[in-house]
């Protein structure tokens, strides 16, 4: 049996550097699960030239389709993957539904990673002219239409949150055809109770705040600039860590020069270790979120989570129980941080509840069980263990 996974970039187009992100982490773990179920697995991605890389016993095959239109890239990858599998018996998985093509293959599955277009209209353009505002509104309408269209490219869909499913039911005239499963993201929990480790910190010790996201505007970098400046002016015992990379890195370094801020980068496998060294994790996205891997990793590390109430984040955080939910604006974020910094017992309670929720619902083991059910139903047989 074979399983082909199609995605734009697991490695860069030259096949040199592996990408780091929530979707990439998700797909590598899915490929490993399929391998455990005795599938031969290959991930097909766009590339400048033909290449093959290995992640354990998984092949990553670069297909030279860059430079073509987006439609031709998707079609080229689908043709290459379809030629590698037996269309009647093997699986083909679109790593993201927006990278899918229309197919009637009963063994095809598309993964819906959240409402990626779910952004305030102003984020569709960097300009504030009337023409730009009109164009932004048009783009938002088109993006919603495209979201429905790609979701219906194949009949088997796995969503990472309930937010998208609820949006579809509200926005569309009918229920989606075919089958839909909801499988939230996951965390591979470390050994030992992260909350207990945090509770041993002495009262009055430095409070450490982590922003572990891509450095992009929609991930809340501009909100964080305001928050760090304000909080830094109020407290001398609060330190911030920005972990990641992205287009706003230069802006962050410039605006936060002189603040108690440390910039780091880390491998995906080190995420929990990094979170374990912090008290508060901030996920201030302004939109475009599924069941955020950043939120789940923070929960699994016993951090007190403060996150914005957008997308699939509201499937994870119950306000004042296992985290704090705030509106996606600077003032709300600052108020939430201020509360957590001042109240150590609240931080510990939220972190303890977040850790318990992660242990009971959001583990890698639970994620695997759910995916095994989907794979068996789609394949029509009890494959694997």
Image: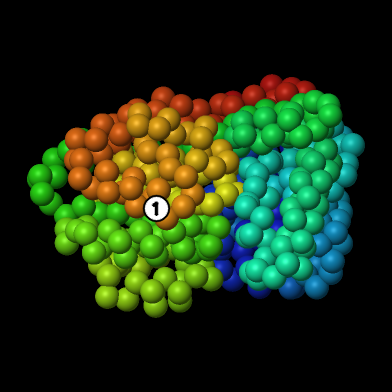
For residue 253, above or below residue 192: below
| Quadrant assignment, res 196 | top left
Q: Quadrant of residue 373?
A: top right
The quarter of the image holding the N terminus is top right
From the top left corner, tell me how far across and down residue 280 is, in percent.
30, 47
Q: Which residue is mark 1?
A: 331
- Of residue 136 and residue 283, the one placed in the foreground of this image is 136
**Residue under the point 84% across and 66% down:** 69
- Residue 152 vertical placement versus 119 (above, below): above
Tell me the crowding category of disc 1: few under 14, some 14 to 19, or many 20 or more residues within 10 angstroms, Cα based. Answer: some
Q: How many marks?
A: 1
The part of the image, by quadrant, that contains residue 159 is top right
Identify which residue, 132 or 259, lies in the foreground.
132
Residue drawn at x 73%, y 24% as measured from the top left: 377
Tell me residue 68's x, y (percent).
84, 69
Q: Position of residue 380 (x, y in %)?
A: 77, 23
Q: Is residue 2 visible?
A: no
Whole-percent x, y for residue 347 in the image: 25, 39
Specify how the rendered protein is coloured: rainbow
Q: Residue at x 74, y 73 (%)?
A: 48
User: Is 123 or 300 nearer to us in this picture?
Assistant: 123
Secondary structure under tag 1 reads helix
- Front-most of residues 52 and 211: 211
Q: Residue at x 89, y 37 (%)?
A: 104
Whether residue 350 is visible to the viewer of this picture, yes or no, is: yes
């Amino acid at each position: 049996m074979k399983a082909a996974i199609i995605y734009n970039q697991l490695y860069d187009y030259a096949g040199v550097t592996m990408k780091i992100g929530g979707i990439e982490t998700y797909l590598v773990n899915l490929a490993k699960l399929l391998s455990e179920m005795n599938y031969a697995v290959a991930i097909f991605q766009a590339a400048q030239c033909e290449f093959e890389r290995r992640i354990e016993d998984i092949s990553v095959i670069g297909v030279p389709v860059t430079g073509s239109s987006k439609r031709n890239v998707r079609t080229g990858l689908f043709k290459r993957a379809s030629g590698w599998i037996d269309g009647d018996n093997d699986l083909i998985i679109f790593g993201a539904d927006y990278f899918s093509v229309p197919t009637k293959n009963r063994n095809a599955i598309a993964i819906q990673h959240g409402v990626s277009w779910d952004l305030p209209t102003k984020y569709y353009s960097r300009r504030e002219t009337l023409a730009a505002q009109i164009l932004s509104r048009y783009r938002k309408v088109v993006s919603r239409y495209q979201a429905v269209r790609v979701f219906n490219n194949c009949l088997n869909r796995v969503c990472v949150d309930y937010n998208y499913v609820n949006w579809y039911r509200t926005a569309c005239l009918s229920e989606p055809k075919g089958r839909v499963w909801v499988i939230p993201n996951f965390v591979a929990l470390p050994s030992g109770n992260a909350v207990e480790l945090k509770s041993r910190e002495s009262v009055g010790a430095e409070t450490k705040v982590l922003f572990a996201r891509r450095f992009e505007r929609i991930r809340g970098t501009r909100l964080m600039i305001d928050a760090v400046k304000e909080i830094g002016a109020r407290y001398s015992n609060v330190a911030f860590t920005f972990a990641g990379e992205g287009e706003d890195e230069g802006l962050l370094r410039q605006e936060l020069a002189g603040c108690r801020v440390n910039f780091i980068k880390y491998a995906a496998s080190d995420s929990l270790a990094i979170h374990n060294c912090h008290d508060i994790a901030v996920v201030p996205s302004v939109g475009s979120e599924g069941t955020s891997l950043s939120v789940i990793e923070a929960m699994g590390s016993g951090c007190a989570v403060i996150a914005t109430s957008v997308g699939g984040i509201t499937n994870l955080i119950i306000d004042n129980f296992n985290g704090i939910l705030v509106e996606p604006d600077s003032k709300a974020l600052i108020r939430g941080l201020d509360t957590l910094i001042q109240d150590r017992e609240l931080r510990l309670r939220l972190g303890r509840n977040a850790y318990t929720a992660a242990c009971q619902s959001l583990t890698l083991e639970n994620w695997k069980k759910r995916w095994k059910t989907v794979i068996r139903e789609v394949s029509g047989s009890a494959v694997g263990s």
